[in-house]
Image (cartoon, grey):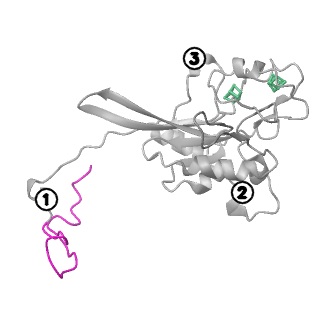
Amino acid sequence: MTQLALVIDLNVCVGCHACVTSCKQWNTSGSAGYLSDMDPYGADPNGTFFNRVQTFEVGEFPNTQTVHFPKSCLHCEDPPCVPVCPTGASYKRAEDGIVLVDYDKCIGCKYCTWACPYGVREFDEQRKVMTKCTLCVDRVTSTVLPEPERKPACVLACPANARLFGDVHDPDSEVSRAILERGGYPLMPEWGTKPSNHYLPRRKTELHIHPEDLERHDNPLKIDGQLPGSYPGAGREDYAT
Ligand code: SF4
Ligand code: SF4
């Protein structure tokens, strides 16, 4: 069975939120929308977002790191949000494994929010229905969009190519190869939900700084009338290994 999913590379995500805004733009104007915003510029803003980026500081000073962590519905293979739904509004598609909500059947009881261990369901306070990431099902199954655009909006928008999309059950797919070769892992597997989305871990990067490079010799602010030229160390490849 096909299982579509996202694979997110935490090593290159820079937390720019392009995925968040492209998701919001596409889905608020498409079949899953609109995605309400309440008091967006006020003291207590609240809104519906299918994809959010959480940013953490990890480690202890001075050895700290900033980690950007994008999170949306993980399209679990065994999703606990589905069987708890009393109306059948939450369901998992047999053909591609995408987990969706049928707004016409949803009564807004929020049982699914309690059942999901990842906190990714988004109750729309204006429409009073449960929403969440659809993996841009309307894009990826489109017969109208050009083939290269049949991907989730977040994948197309990411400037760092941190987001991959494909069938995690196909061992030859780009996502399966990335998981295998780069140690991709599911989020909190101990819950037994078998999340389809995976994360690629951050990698240690060692910096080698050359003392002579701490001063820029080509600083244009100091060299009147001259354009920046090449500087000692330009092109050196041992800055980061
Ligand atoms: Fe359901 Fe949560 Fe899994 Fe998405 S991440 S399929 S909402 S349990
Ligand atoms: Fe089902 Fe809607 Fe209730 Fe969630 S909030 S359990 S989708 S009826």
* Residue extending farthest left: 212
Q: How far apart are marks 1 and 2 (CA)?
A: 46 Å
Viewer-proximal residue among 199 and 154: 154
Magenta-colored span? 217-241
Q: Mark 2 points at which residue?
A: 150
Left or right of 100 on screen, residue 51: left
| Res 239 visible | yes
Q: How far apart are marks 3 and 2 (CA)?
A: 33 Å
- Could you tell me which residue is drawn at 20 percent across and 76 percent down? 229
Q: Name the residue under label 1.
A: 213
- The answer to whether 209 is drawn above or below residue 204 in the figure is below
Q: Quadrant of residue 190?
A: top right
Magenta stretch encompasses residue 40: no
- The answer to whether 148 is drawn above or below residue 73 in the figure is below
Helix, strand or loop at label 1? It is helix
Q: Name the residue under label 3.
A: 190
Q: Residues within 10 Å of mark 1 (few under 14, many from 20)?
A: few
Amino acid type of the residue that numbered disc 2 sits on in the rendered structure? Arg
